[in-house]
Image (tube, rainbow, N blue to C red):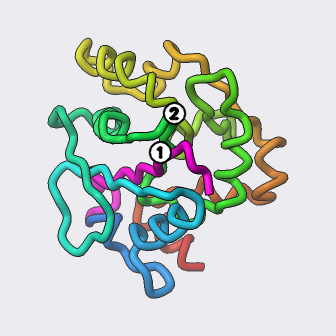
Amino acid sequence: MIEDCTALILAGGDSRRMGQDKAALQLDGKTLLDRVTATMQQVFPKVILSVRQPRTGVAVQQVCDEQEAGGPLAGLIAGLAQAQTQWIFAVACDMPFVTPAVVLQLAGHRAGHQAVVPMVAGHPQPLAAFYATNTLQTMRANLAAGDRSLRGSLEKLDVRYVSEAELRGADPQLRSFFDLDTPEDFQAAQK
């Protein structure tokens, strides 16, 4: 268990490209949300769910966005504001293959940084990343200034980016970073 960290599952998106609520999609008999929650509960003593509106039938604490239409940044801010630990690990509910090994590997890079973000295919993965709770004010200021992008906030933080080569030790095929945005992604995940 990573005792100084709270898991934050982001499940407040519109799921526009999917055409239906991604968190409720069934994969191997479990919803995407249940799969990610079960994985996070293996690694963290506390799991929080970030939503735009409360969900029914959820066994973990829920937090609602402080600002409407703020995107994932608003969800991250809500989680940072509620966390009673020094760190949060933010993960999207549509990443059903994230593994404890990858989370633990990322956790090992936190010392001296404000965030630990994987880099996959040349792109940062801010929705499978660690954030120190002292980043809350920076993130709030960015959102208040109209910058809803997580990448914009990352530019203002001390970030340790973790390369694919480093990640492959914990996840050789980098399946942890496969997110389900479209019906085609969901079909691929079922295979």
Residue 16 in view (yes/no): no
Which residues are drawn in magenta?
1-20
Residue 27 in view (yes/no): yes
Q: Residue at x 62, y 33 (%)?
A: 116
Q: Which residue is mark 1?
A: 90
Q: Where in the figure is residue 65, as x and y percent of width and height? A: 21, 40
CB atoms of marks 2 and 1 within 8 Å: yes
Name the amino acid, label 2: Tyr
The N terminus appears in which quarter of the rendering? Answer: bottom right
Tell me the number on the disc at residue 131: 2
Q: Is residue 26 above or below residue 44?
A: below
Q: Residue at x 81, y 42 (%)?
A: 166
Q: Residue at x 48, y 65 (%)?
A: 36
Q: Residue at x 66, y 32 (%)?
A: 110
Q: Secondary structure at mark 1?
A: strand
Residue count near mark 1 (Cα–Cα under 10 Å), binned few <14, some 14–19, many ≥20:
many
Direction from residue 64 to residue 175 in the image, left or right: right
Q: Is residue 114 magenta?
A: no
Q: Is residue 18 magenta?
A: yes
Question: On the image, which quarter does residue 71 sit in?
Answer: top left
Residue count near mark 2 (Cα–Cα under 10 Å), binned few <14, some 14–19, many ≥20:
many
The C terminus appears in which quarter of the rendering? Answer: bottom right
Direction from residue 8 to residue 54 in the image, left or right: left
Q: Nearer the viewer, residue 53 or 122?
A: 53
Q: Secondary structure at mark 2?
A: strand
Question: On the image, which quarter does residue 70 sit in?
Answer: top left
Q: Nearer the viewer, residue 90 or 119?
A: 90
